[in-house]
Image (spheres, grey):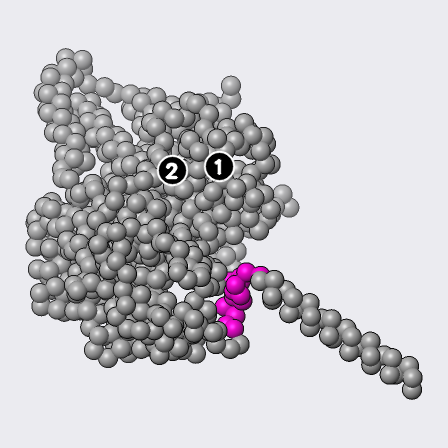
Amino acid sequence: MKRRIVRARVSLLVLVLAALVVLGVALIGGPPQRGLAGSAPAPQPQKPDNSACLACHSKPGQSYQLPSGEVLSISVDPAVYDKSSHANVACQVCHTNIAGFPHPLNAAQDTRAYTFQYKDTCKQCHNDQFKQLSDSVHTQLLNGGNRNAPVCSDCHNPHSQPTIQTDANGNPASVEHAAIAKICSHCHNDIYNQYVNSVHGSGIAENKNPDVPACTDCHGVHIIQGPDSPGFRINSPTQVCGKCHTNPQIMDKYGISTQVLNTYVADFHGTTVTLFEKTDPQAATNKPVCYDCHGVHNIARVDDPTQGIALKQNMLKACQRCHPDATTNFPDAWLSHYIPSPQKYPVVYIVNLFYSILIPTVIGGMVIYVGSDIYRRNFLDRRLRKGKKQDEPEKPPVDPEAKG
Amino acid sequence: MNAESKKITRFTLLQRIEHWLLFLSFTTLAVTGLSQKYALSGISDAIIGFLGGIENVRAIHHFAAIIFMLEAVYHLVVIGYKLLVLRLRASLLPGSEDVIDGIQSLLYNLGVRKELPRMDRFNFAEKLEYWAMIWGLVMMSLTGFMLWNPIATTHFLPGEFIPAAKSAHGNEAVLAVLAILVWHFYNVHLRHWNWSMFTGKLTRKEMEEEHPLELEAIESGASAVRPAPRVQSRRLAVYAPVALLASAGLIFGIYKFTSFENTAIKTIPPAITGVAVYVKQTPSPIPTQPPAPTTAPLRTLAPGATAGLLTWDTGIGQVFADNCKTCHGNAGGLNLGSYANAMQGGADGPVIIAGDPAISLLIQKMSGSHPRTLSPAALAQVEAWIKAGAPEK
């Protein structure tokens, strides 16, 4: 009984000591709680106390004039922030350079420089995405001195970005998917205007159709490759267009053939591009890929009267971009993704049929004759010689079975 | 020398040279052509890789086609000389006797007939092969012209004839190669090795078996009859200029065949719509900055940079940036984006062993199977750099 009391007292002592150590560490003042170190986001269990900051910054319409003359908004709407995915993140997790009041003087000369002060801060929690971005054409441009190239916060406003909703497969939900192009349009507005009127973009703009591609479906999300790079060009038929256009689950809804990639690869142009893709995925080739004929962001239905390349005059224009001397007969040299049949491209069909008969007939005939010669020399002659040796020279050399 | 092994001349040296030209150009055409027809098979991969890429394969195919056609022109001139000047018998001309010979040979093989038919200088099997060759030459030249000059062709034929020509060209090739493999290989290599295209001779025994009628003519002296020298030179005086003109015309035709049109542009096609990439939205959600001067200009290798030893900073880093960084950047296992990361290696440990390129995984990968390999010049630079201890500065 006594021993049990002692044990209980020791436990209590350990508990109190541990609590004191934890409190002491907290009081000595370790670095501001980041809590989300590493790449896995681990939101704090409860909302941080941002009241000190919000005491001033929650007032709307506050601003700060930078030496360039630009005015920086320094208001944060707590209602919006609380709904954002960062609601559980304390201000100082990102704003590490602002501590105490009055704040230290900020060295930024203009708003862009101010944004760049925080361009690396997201990697504390979003390391994978940050790494991908650092390999992208956007970061290459930024490192090359282009200050318009985007950093994280240009696409994801850190004070308002809600958590991205995903579907069962982890892809962005259709409402999110439909909003992607709007983000890109901030900087690529002319392209956006083409896109929203295209066969792809109009589907997204009108009814948030998740089957049609958003910008990121073709260009990638954070690791966006320069679309004028040889690699993007060569890999695009299989890795961009082919992803959806060979998928019957999507294409059957719209009555679009899934043979488009096969038939392209079977043709001279597609064969060459596929060979380059296999042997040197970064090689520069001028053989056309899907978008050279179908258009890029302004891609239209093939029966579109002004642009559709099912119409011969439109196809001819596409041909002439690489074959300037091409004339009206020339577009038919391309089978338009059809497999030759008596109705479509009958001449090709007949040639194929002719050879599918001629080759087996000729080679089969040769094989029959060669077979007969082998039979004669290796079996019949030997048997006849054997027969002669056995002194039966008068025996007819014909074996009744051999006639068959 | 006994009578059976006595050698009888079958082909002159010039005829044998013709055959070798044909053999080399045909084989080259078959290898480079079929690897294009079946471009996605594993064997084609190996062939195309060995020949240095599809553009090289096509150039070699075109070159072999020119040799093939020039040989055909020469052959035509020689045939003309033999038939018109020497007035020799057209021994390759097929006739009804060849059909009979073929049927009788088959029956003999099956044991129905006791005797092989007696055949002349060229038996039915050889005539079949020769005329199949001529048929192939005509078909391949016609369809080859259409494929080489598709725009010119579509001036006078429907466009659909181009893919039809492609189909015929490829199928004809399959037919020709199979015929060579089955018919030619069997008859002159497997049945018994026929030396006449190497030595020009056949033994009397072989002649007796395969060309008894010709043997008779040779031994009776009938085949050695030549026109009187005066007659021959009179004929030649007419034939030579005609042959010269005709062959000049044909060679000019081959030249036009190969240079008739510039089918396509040589550059990357222009973007289909001249839309500007960077156009900010107005009113802009993001303030715009004029592009500032590039602070860190991209280094490029000087044209003659192979001579001096490079360090990471003076070029090796750029080699990796240009060739590897798309995959091996910050997101890949191995990061070749900076010197420290490159030296640290990837999931399989270090890839650069300073001082020893041979055991460096990076060099091994580059010399073996990797989706992308460095150019030989760049690889040599990297190897030299590792050998020198992989210096950073």
Left or right: B316, with A264 as reference point: right
Query: Which residue in the structure is indicated by mark 2?
Result: B52
Of the pair A326 and B157, the residue shown nearer to us? A326
The picture places residue A185, in percent across and down from the top left corner, at 23, 64
Seen at 11% across and 17% down, the residue is B237
Instruction: Single out the residue that lies furthest toward the right.
Output: A2
At mark 2, the secondary structure is loop
Q: Could you tell whether B368 is left or right of A210 in the image?
A: right
Q: Nearer the viewer, residue A389 or B292?
A: B292
Which residue carries the number 1 mark?
B192
> Does residue B172 appear in the picture of this structure?
no
| Magenta region | A30-44
Q: Residue at x 48, y 30 (%)?
A: B393
CA neighbours of label 1 inside 10 A, class few (<14), some (14 to 19), many (20+) = few
Residue A71 against residue A276 in the figure, above or below: below
The answer to which quarter of the image holds residue B194 is top left
